[in-house]
Image: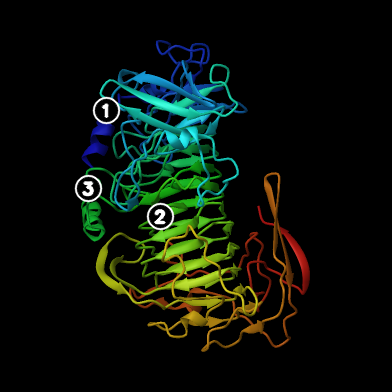
Amino acid sequence: MLAAIVCLMAMPARVAAGEYHVAVSGDDANAGSPARPFRTISAAARAAQPGDIVTVHGGTYRERVNPPRGGTSADRRITYQAAAGENVVIKGSEIVRGWERFSPGVWKVTLPNSFFGAFNPYRELIKGDWYFGEGLHLGGVFVNGRALREVKTLAQVTDPRPTPDMRDPADPAWVWFCTGDRESVTLYANFQNRDPSRDEVEISVRETCFYPGQTGCNFITLRGFHLSQAATQWAAPTAEQVGLVGTNWSKGWIIEDNVISESKCVGLTLGKDRQTGNNGVDYNEMVHRVIAAGWNEAHIGSHLVRRNTIFQCGAAGICGSFGAAFSRIEDNHVYDIYTYRPYWGAEIAGIKIHGAIDVLIRHNRVHNAYIGIWLDWMAQGTRVSGNLCYENDYVDFFPEVDHGPYLADNNLLLSGFAIKDWSQGGAYVHNLIAGLVSRAPQARKTPFFRAHSTEFVRIENIRGGDNRFFNNVFVGVGNGEVFKKTDYLPHDAVDADSGYGLALYDHAALPVQAGGNVYLRGAVNLKSETGFQVQAGFEPAIRLVEQGSGVTLTLTAPGLPTGFKTKTVTTALLGRAVVPEEGFENPDGSPLTIDTDYLGNPRPGDPPAPGPFARLPAGTQSWPVW
């Protein structure tokens, strides 16, 4: 709160809103007008006041933008936007020349520590809570925009070998290594047939691209930029989460239509502050600290993150601990996360949110992201709706130690491992679940809150169960087949209690409700379930085709018997999650009805068709799903 007050006090008195311009041909001594633009975005940020717009014209800007203030309301925000139709790039890297040939294909360059100033990412290691790795640095090396993979020895640069856990082991030679002393850093890179005297070689030198250095800079819009190549640190939920782009414990940002890529760890963060702790704090203790620091809807969260493309990030595409509460994350394309497998840790996902209170995660495309969507601790009032998840190497959806109520509806979960359930109090409605489901009760106590708030109630054990499954389509792998665990998955990837369908919940500690579900190709129903349909030998022939920027899903549906009936899913049908004693409802407390499908079409009449589409007639159909 004090930082927010200081941030506001720093604003000069100003009445009329204005627009500042930035161009690579400008000068920071200019006034920022169209005719006399600033040279850097940072200069415009220092000038901009609530209600102002900063328009940045085409070109590459190698700087860390540290906005000194935000807006005062949703109507008087500070907007940073790329000029219409112009390609504006903000990079956390610098071009480095002077490379010398070291061995065939391998080059080296030595840089004095003064080159980096106060932050040298080649002397800083990745570290933090729940990070399980060693010896890797925050920096990165890029040739003609392609990221190289860091290795731990010079021998791995001169004689590169594929590692079994790489997503694309076919071309393992693009690697780099660094060493240094008190005076300098030496980088070795295998450029193969590239010549760094002719090609563009960049190295990451800044820890972020757009991130306020102080908390409480609210109501900022960031629109239309390509931000890349930052030397970001591991974003543990107990730490200040500094992403390539981040909000730093603020409220009301709009982050839209950007491309965010090549972050050493995390692309976009909606995370906590540093003052409440920076690693090494028990998470239940952290809850009380952030509440004391003003974690509530009036001061934190309520961000809108939409239509961004996020890829090639080492750990996570989007993450947020506490600071994402009351936010909307929608229409984003997140992919190629953790592709190089440089390390392991518990924060690796396309979208990873802690403390997801009244968060809407809607219509995102998440693939090749290891874990797709991960709700860790205190998902309450959260809705995960209409997301497309596929080719995620671990699992599509992972709710972990949540008491609910949370709702997952109209999702396409198409990876081999669809749901890893370490929670209770969830509702799964009208999803296509085409992979394994596993569950494991947790010997952990986690908090829950008053409905639609951050008002702490108490902590309780996660016993498992208390879920609802209505009108889903489950697909198995056929009789006699089993899920084949990939070698690079951790030892506990697939829980002992696992299967296709819902039979794994037959002995859950808390009762599970189910109805209106369809089970195909060996998926098995819940024993206590009524009003379901099993067609064990039916082959749905699910096919997903990527064409350009679009994706089409083809599926063959079975003919359902005349007497098969489903129910329209409402707040009344879902009841109340047992531990918090709260209903499945909209963030404003009003009752909800699942009456639209994945595509946003209304579900006609009653009974609704099972699965994510409003109509599911027998036979083969195709839908444009992105």
Image check: 476 left or right of 348?
Answer: right
The answer to which of 415 and 427 lies nearer the viewer is 415
Left or right for 79, reference 593: left
| Residue linked to disc 3 | 276
Please tell me which of labels 3 and 2 falls first in the chain.
Answer: 3
Give x and y (percent) for residue 444. 29, 69
> What percent of the width, then of the height, locates residue 422?
40, 69
Q: Which residue is mark 2?
A: 353
Q: Are marks 3 and 2 in contact (CB under 8 Å)?
A: no
Count up the numbered dots: 3
Report the residue at 57% width, 46% height from top.
169
**Residue at point 58%, 82% (across, down):** 524
Check the image and report above or below for 358 versus 58. below
* Badge 2 element: strand
Callout 1: few (<14), some (14-19), or many (20+) C-alpha neighbours within 10 Å? few
- Amino acid type of the residue tagged 2 in the rendering: Ile
Residue 121 drawn above or below residue 288: above
Residue corresponding to mark 1: 10
Q: Earlier in the sequence, mark 2 or mark 1?
A: 1
The three-letter amino acid code for the residue at tag 3 is: Thr
Residue occupying the point 25% across, 68% down: 457
- Residue occupying image coordinates x 37% and y 35%: 211
Residue type of the residue flagged with mark 1 = Ala
| Mark 2 residue crowding within 10 angstroms, few (<14) / some (14–19) / many (20+) | many
From the image, state whether disc 2 or disc 1 is nearer to you. Answer: 2
> Is residue 161 positioned above or below 424 on the image?
above
Please tell me whether mark 3 or mark 1 is closer to you in this view.
Answer: 3
> For the residues marked 2 and 1, what is the alpha-carbon distance in whole angstroms?
32 Å
Between 197 and 625, which is closer to the camera in this rendering?
197
User: Nearer the N terminus, badge 3 or badge 1?
Assistant: 1
Question: Where is 446 relative to 183, above or below?
Answer: below
